[in-house]
Image (tube, rainbow, N blue to C red):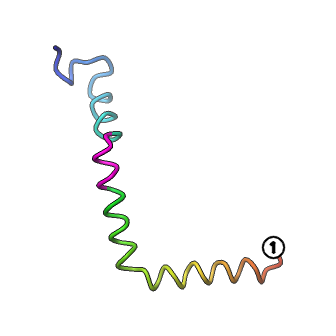
Amino acid sequence: MPERAERAGGPVAVWRERATDPAAVTGVLALAALCAALYSPALTWAVTGGLAGFSLSGSV
């Protein structure tokens, strides 16, 4: 069986395979959830303010 770098597509295919690996995506999402949890009060106020601004602007 050929090595990963010798496959069709070469190194690009290897990086694409790594970037689309479900474990990598799960790790990134877990890190994003952790960061969001740490900043939840600020995010809550940002979302609330955005919705209030949208509703008060007459865009509804």
- Of residue 11 and residue 21, the one placed in the foreground of this image is 21
Q: Is residue 28 magenta?
A: no
What residue is drawn where x is 21% and y is 18%?
6
Q: Is residue 30 above or below residue 49?
A: above
Q: Is residue 26 magenta?
A: yes
Relative placement, left or right, of 44 versus 18 is: right
What residue is drawn where x is 46% and y is 84%?
42
Q: Position of residue 16 (x, y in %)?
A: 34, 34
What residue is drawn where x is 35% and y is 39%?
20
Residue position for label 1: 60
- Of residue 1 and residue 16, the one placed in the foreground of this image is 1
Q: Is residue 17 above or below residue 41?
A: above
- Of residue 3 and residue 41, the one placed in the foreground of this image is 41
Q: Position of residue 49 (x, y in %)?
A: 62, 84
Quadrant of image for the N terminus: top left
Q: Position of residue 56 (x, y in %)?
A: 77, 83
Q: Main secondary structure of the magenta part?
A: helix
Q: Quadrant of residue 38?
A: bottom left
The three-letter amino acid code for the residue at tag 1 is Val
Q: Is residue 11 above or below residue 44?
A: above
Relative placement, left or right, of 57 versus 38 is: right
Write the start and end of the magenta stretch as one range.
21-27
Quadrant of image for the C terminus: bottom right
Q: Position of residue 2 (x, y in %)?
A: 17, 15
Q: Quadrant of residue 37?
A: bottom left
